């Protein structure tokens, strides 16, 4: 016990003195040096100030009538409009409809993309058969499919799912393929030397190894899916957040457009953060 | 020497590349007796890891044959355990589960055997830790525990301590020697570290630069049990200087060839 204490004392004392000497010179300019770490609190304050400045600028621009109200409503008008839309239930209904659409569209896309991505990530022959056409289709803009989807399935719910699917699926397949390919070969080799067959290597080693990055792929593509949802709703829908925006445009209700955009942004952010949080919980080992 | 445990006969390996074929190994011949610790040493790129992969069955030889107990080796199998340098443990499993992963039998049996082997490498207290919570040395100890746990006929180690710092590496060498001296198994160890080769081995095989062949076969007569003290004995230095000369000749050859190729 006594020994431990005596050996510890000089150790603990030394680093305390060193920075005290240099403090005056070192501290200055920490924000201005490249790659220099800053305190989390400082980071937060700067981020908050940045938001504040953004809103202030907006408010000021609206206040001095930089543009007419129908072009640029003030943040206060937008807030009031938002409260109104919440009160009469429109916002909630639209959000519900949009949320359901993205959930179904994204779920269909994911359910098909996952097995295909895993397959072409592991078997070169499957990759040769599937990857080139998928890569080709991926570069066709999903928006250009809009008229076609309406011809194919009409304007009911399935058309929105289809647009989300077209926009998301091909990207997902390629990203999942890449996730699977990046599993270190050593894991597979070790499993083989343990006498495991390919199917169980796939199930017990490749999938768990790729799972955290696949989860990230889903999180990122979910963000993209929001864009396709809104586009689908802008073009042909009778409800949903995108539809609310396009109707508001017809009546020059710019404040409603702003509310719609904000709600979509916030919903996207919430879903993204929720997935990030869940991912961290499930894949705690991957740190 | 009676029937060898592992026998490598005329193994040749050619990699087909875009800019022509590369002969990685050209006529590798050697034998390892039962319960012998043999190290293959050579410059980087001499094909020593390729050789190990071929013996493990993870890669296919272009010509030649690898025999284990007189039977030809075609594919990876549980008779040959492998320890790599990196990505040795599955990061989503605890230390205990990583070892159990290699085992067969009832749940209870697997847990018991895994615990015994974690104890063997001195990590019984870290059974529930995930690899990311452990140091590089600890991870390699668990990898060794796993490779020993299912009792393969031959242990193949591909620079298992290559990614560790000098002090940890020294401790790991001592641990491996201690375990080997207690349990005596057939080991083929690959490294480019001469001290490591001499300290661990009964025999050291020096490979030529590419294309790799066995150039020298040196029996290390240092008495066992070996502790870190042998590192400073004249005997140890003798072996070291012989190996150093042999390896250096090859690295010089590679260097001049590379210069000439420009």
Image: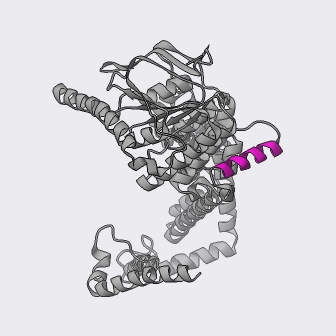
Q: Is residue A201 left or right of residue A15?
A: right
- Name the colour scheme: one colour
Question: Nearest the camera: A151 or B86?
Answer: B86
Residue at 36%, 86% (x, y): give it. A17
Residue at 28%, 29% (x, y): give it. B250
Measured as percent of width and height from the top left, residue A216 is found at 56, 51
Quarter occupied by residue A152: top right
Give the quarter of the figure containing the C terminus of chain A.
Answer: bottom right
Quarter occupied by residue B210: top left
Q: Is residue B111 magenta?
A: yes
Residue at 57%, 75% (x, y): give it. A81
Measured as percent of width and height from the top left, residue A49 is found at 42, 80
Question: Nearest the camera: B198 or A282?
Answer: B198
Q: Is residue A158 left or right of residue B191?
A: right
Does A261 appear above or below B73? Answer: below
Magenta-drawn segment: B107-120
């Amino acid at each position: 016990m006594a020994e431990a204490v005596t050996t510890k004392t000089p150790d603990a004392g030394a680093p305390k003195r060193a920075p005290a000497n240099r403090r005056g010179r070192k501290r200055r300019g920490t924000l201005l040096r490249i790659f220099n770490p800053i305190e989390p609190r400082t980071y937060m304050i700067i981020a908050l100030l940045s938001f504040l400045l953004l809103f202030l600028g907006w408010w000021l621009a609206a206040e001095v009538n930089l543009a007419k109200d129908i072009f640029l409503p003030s943040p206060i008008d937008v807030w009031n409009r938002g409260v109104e839309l919440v009160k009469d239930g429109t916002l909630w209904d639209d959000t519900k409809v949009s949320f359901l659409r993205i959930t179904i569209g994204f779920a269909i896309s994911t359910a098909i993309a996952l097995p295909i991505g895993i397959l072409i990530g592991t078997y070169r022959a499957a990759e040769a058969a599937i990857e080139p056409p998928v890569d080709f289709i991926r570069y066709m803009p999903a928006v250009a499919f809009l008229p076609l989807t309406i011809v194919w399935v009409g304007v009911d719910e399935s058309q929105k799912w289809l647009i989300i699917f077209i926009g998301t699926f091909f990207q997902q397949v390629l990203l999942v393929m890449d996730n699977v390919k990046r599993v270190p070969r050593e894991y597979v080799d070790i499993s083989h030397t343990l006498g495991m067959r390919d199917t169980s290597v796939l199930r017990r080693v490749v999938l768990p190894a790729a799972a955290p990055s696949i989860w990230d792929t889903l999180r990122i593509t979910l963000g993209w899916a929001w864009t396709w949802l809104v586009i689908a709703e802008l073009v042909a829908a009778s409800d949903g957040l995108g539809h609310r925006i396009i109707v508001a445009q017809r009546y020059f209700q710019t404040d409603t457009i702003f509310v719609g955009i904000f709600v979509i942004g916030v919903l996207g952010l919430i879903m993204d953060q929720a997935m990030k949080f869940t991912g961290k919980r499930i894949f705690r080992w991957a740190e | 020497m009676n029937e060898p445990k592992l026998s490598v006969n005329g193994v040749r390996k050619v990699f087909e590349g875009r800019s022509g074929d590369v002969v990685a190994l050209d006529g590798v011949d050697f034998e390892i007796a039962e319960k012998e610790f043999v190290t293959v040493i050579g410059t980087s790129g001499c094909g020593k890891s390729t050789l190990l992969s071929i013996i493990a069955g993870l890669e296919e030889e272009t010509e030649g044959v690898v025999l284990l107990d007189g039977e030809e080796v075609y594919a990876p199998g549980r008779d040959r355990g492998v320890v790599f340098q990196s990505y040795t443990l599955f990061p989503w499993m605890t230390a205990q589960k990583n070892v159990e992963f290699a085992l067969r039998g009832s749940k209870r049996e697997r847990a018991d055997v895994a615990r015994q082997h974690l104890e063997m490498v001195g990590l019984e207290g870290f059974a529930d830790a995930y690899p990311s919570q452990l140091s590089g040395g600890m991870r390699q100890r668990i990898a060794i525990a796993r490779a020993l746990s299912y009792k393969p006929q031959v242990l193949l180690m591909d620079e298992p301590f290559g990614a560790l710092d000098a002090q940890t590496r020294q401790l790991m060498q001592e641990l491996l020697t201690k375990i080997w001296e207690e349990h005596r198994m057939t080991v083929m160890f690959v490294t480019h570290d001469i001290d490591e080769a001499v300290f661990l081995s009964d025999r050291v095989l020096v490979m030529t630069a590419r294309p790799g062949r066995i150039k020298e076969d040196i029996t290390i007569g240092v008495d066992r049990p070996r502790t870190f003290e042998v590192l400073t004995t004249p005997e140890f230095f003798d072996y070291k200087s012989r190996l150093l000369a042999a390896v250096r000749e090859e690295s010089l050859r590679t260097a001049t060839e590379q210069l000439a190729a420009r």
